[in-house]
Amino acid sequence: MSNDADKPEAEGAPPAAKNKKKKLIVIGAAAAAVLLGGGGGAYMMFGGGPAKAEAGAGHGDKAEATEEEAADEGEGEGGEGGHGGGDKEAPLDVPPLLVNLRTADGAPHFLKVHVMLVPGAKTTAASLKDSLPALLDAYQPFLRELRPEDLSGSAAVFRIKEELLIRSRDALGDGKVKEILVQDLIQQ
């Protein structure tokens, strides 16, 4: 009788050990995926070019700061830049843009985008405000060509910011728009 009692335990041991190994492998793979995904997301969010430039300016990069201050002094004629803040001008609030998205099935989908523009070293918020119609004209074709699936995922806002920044630079020239700040991005 003791042999019958020992047999189920002996037969049950290898499958239990295999199940434990499988569970450990699955848990390990899931943990690795989470760590890699988090690391990749952090790299995308914090490791880009504009973040490095801002971090470099914060650590006392005097040559870059002096060049930007010289550009501000050359264009500022007692306007908003004369408050002693250097290139610390307030962002320009762009009115919200509402566009219909391109869909394959023809169903109506809309996108509302509200952004702010950070003036670059070669301009002020007032001159950006004067150039706003040209900027909106540059943004419209890009936003209208977006599809609802282009707006899914965590990287959608990053892609839209980059594309709008490229179009800003194409429309106005380099150094006019330093950064795009997305305030709202609503899809219906």
Image: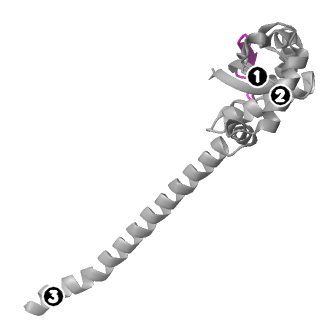
State yes or no: discs 3 and 2 in contact (Cβ < 8 Å).
no
Left or right: where does residue 144 sit relative to residue 109? right
Question: How many other residues sit within 10 Å of disc 2, few (<14), some (14-19) or many (≥20)?
Answer: some
User: Disc 1 designates what residue?
Assistant: 87
Q: Is residue 46 left or right of residue 173?
A: left
**Span of residues in magenta:** 95-108
Residue 3 image-quadrant placement: bottom left
Which amino acid lies under the numbered mark 2 shown in the image of this protein? Glu
* Residue type pointed to by label 3: Asp
Q: Nearer the viewer, mark 3 or mark 2?
A: 2
Residue 128, magenta (yes or no): no
Is there a contact, CB below 8 Å, between mark 1 and mark 2? yes
Is residue 149 in view from this perspective?
no
**Disc sitting over residue 6 in the figure:** 3
Q: Residue at label 2?
A: 68
Q: Quadrant of residue 8?
A: bottom left
Q: Position of residue 88 (x, y in %)?
A: 72, 21
- Residue 159 image offset from top left, x and y in percent: 73, 36
Q: Is residue 67 above or below residue 14?
A: above
Q: Which residue does the image show at 86% across and 11% down from the upper left?
A: 127
Q: Earlier in the sequence, mark 3 or mark 1?
A: 3
Q: Earlier in the sequence, mark 1 or mark 2?
A: 2
